[in-house]
Image (tube, rainbow, N blue to C red):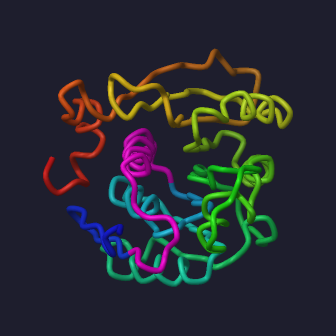
């Protein structure tokens, strides 16, 4: 059974009412996006599918000027995320919104949009409706997510996605259709000996200055089962024992 809470250096995530718990790959994603934007003094951030509030909290820790709207469809998760935010040092800069991201009346454009969306669209579902929505995209399909991003991102803004590696080709097709651009893909491995299982996407609206996509890879652990130096660099400010 997953722990009911996850303690970080500067905040704590309670997660007993959330279908999706804190995972290593979601922490890695939070570390990467938070570090990549910390020099840009980003202000308006949208977190689609906030879950426990993890990504918003990680981002707020590293980016002191960020004002974050975090949307969550599931009522219990939204309530717990709000409690996690209130107990953090950045409660004045993060707003949890219990709403459907597809129909929410957005009031502004965003510098940054982040999302760790449901993973298993169109695949066999297990029991438990809350976890089905969180895992299987019953509430939000990938093409819908990308349409929301395109509509609500500033022309010079950036979006970040964490997706399963196997959705690479599907994503590529949708990105072209919506005239977005993948600036960077980081392929994630559980270890140096494993195949890719996740990909972290950095994207922008397509424009005349668009260049080639940068490809990188990031194993979580080395051949001895220890965290790699890249992983430790990204998570050192968050994990208690790094």
Query: As drawn, is 237 to the left or to the right of 71?
Result: left
86 or 81, which lies in front?
A: 81
- In the image, residue 23 lies in the stretch drawn in magenta: yes
Residue 64 in the image: above or below residue 71: above
The part of the image, by quadrant, that contains residue 173 is top right
Q: Which residue is rendered at x = 36% and y = 71% of the image?
A: 90
Residue in view at x 21 percent, y 46 percent: 236
Q: Quadrant of the N terminus?
A: bottom left
State the residue in front, 10 or 209: 10
The picture places residue 3, in percent across and down from the top left corner, at: 31, 70
Q: Which residues are magenta?
A: 15-42
Residue 137 relative to residue 235: left or right: right
Give the side of residue 18 with respect to residue 221, left or right. Answer: right
Residue 213: x percent and y percent?
Answer: 61, 19
Residue 144 in the image: state x and y as whole percent: 80, 53
User: Image quadrant of residue 5?
Assistant: bottom left
How far from the left and from the top, in percent, is residue 174? Answer: 80, 35
Residue lying farthest to the top in this orientation: 212
Q: Determine whether 205 is above or below 213 in the image.
A: below
| Nearer to us in this view, 14 or 62 | 14
Name the outermost residue toward the right: 177
Count of residue discs: 0
Q: Residue furthest left?
A: 241
């Amino acid at each position: 059974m997953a722990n009911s809470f996850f303690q970080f250096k500067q905040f704590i995530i309670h997660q007993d009412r959330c279908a999706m718990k804190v995972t290593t790959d979601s922490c890695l994603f939070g570390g990467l996006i938070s570090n990549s934007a910390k020099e840009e003094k980003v202000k308006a951030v949208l977190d689609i599918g906030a879950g426990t509030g993890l990504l918003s909290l990680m981002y707020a820790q590293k980016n002191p000027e960020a004002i974050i709207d975090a949307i969550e469809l599931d009522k219990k998760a939204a309530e717990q995320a709000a409690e996690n935010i209130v107990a953090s040092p950045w409660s004045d800069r993060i707003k949890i919104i219990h709403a459907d991201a597809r129909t929410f009346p957005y009031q502004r454009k965003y510098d940054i949009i982040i999302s760790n969306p449901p993973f298993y669209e169109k695949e066999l579902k297990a029991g438990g409706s809350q976890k089905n929505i969180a895992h299987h995209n019953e509430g939000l399909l990938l093409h819908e997510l990308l349409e929301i991003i395109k509509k609500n991102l500033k022309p010079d803004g950036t979006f970040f996605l964490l997706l399963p590696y196997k959705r690479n080709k599907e994503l590529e097709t949708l990105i072209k259709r919506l005239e977005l651009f993948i600036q960077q893909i980081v392929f994630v491995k559980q270890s140096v000996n494993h195949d890719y299982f996740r990909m972290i996407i950095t994207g922008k609206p397509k424009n005349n200055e668009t260049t080639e996509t940068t490809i990188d890879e990031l194993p979580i652990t080395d051949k001895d089962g220890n965290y790699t130096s890249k992983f430790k660099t990204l998570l050192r400010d968050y994990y208690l024992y790094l």
